[in-house]
Image (cartoon, rainbow, N blue to C red):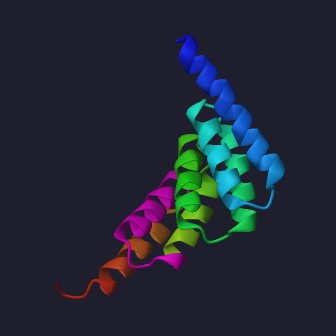
Amino acid sequence: QPCSVGRSRRSRAFDSLGARKNMKSHTCWHVFGLFHRSRGNYAQAIRCYLQALRIEPDHFQILRDLAILQVQTRELDGFVETRHKLLRDKPGVMQNWMALAVGLKLSGRNSKPARKLLDSWMKTQGDD
């Protein structure tokens, strides 16, 4: 375990150095968020992902990582917003429709929007 502790300290130092040296890099902020998520510091990871998205607003992987943490931390309004953005960016991906419908349901909102959303998705599928 002492080896892994040393590696963790080094990786944190490199992440911090990368963020300080290139504060306008969405990649640095995303990696910094991944590091915090791996350490269980979800609030800080979400802040890092949001900073990365300020720089690169439509980055699909960062949006997905953010959505995962938002639902995990029960930040359901943010989850719905993030999933709605993912759906607008990639409407052909079924997972985006389903995740938004689940988010609407979990957020305690009326289930009618979730049902309407899934009905809309079914219409896009045609008569396969």
Residue 12: where, in percent of width, then height? 69, 33
The residue closer to the viewer here, 71 or 64, is 64
Q: Residue furthest top?
A: 2
The residue at 67%/44% (across/down) is 32
Q: Residue furthest bottom?
A: 126
**Picture quadrant where residue 73 is located:** top right
Q: Is residue 46 left or right of residue 90?
A: right
Residue 98: where, in percent of width, then height? 39, 64
The answer to whether residue 111 is visible is no
Residue 29: where, in percent of width, then height? 70, 52
The residue closer to the viewer here, 14 or 77, is 14
Residue 97: where, in percent of width, then height? 42, 69
Screen quadrant of the C terminus: bottom left
Q: Is residue 33 left or right of residue 24?
A: left
The answer to whether residue 64 is visible is yes
Q: Is residue 106 magenta?
A: yes
* Residue segment shown in magenta: 88-109
The residue at 62%/38% (across/down) is 35
The residue at 32%/85% (across/down) is 123
**Picture quadrant where residue 119 is located:** bottom left
The residue closer to the viewer here, 8 or 94, is 8
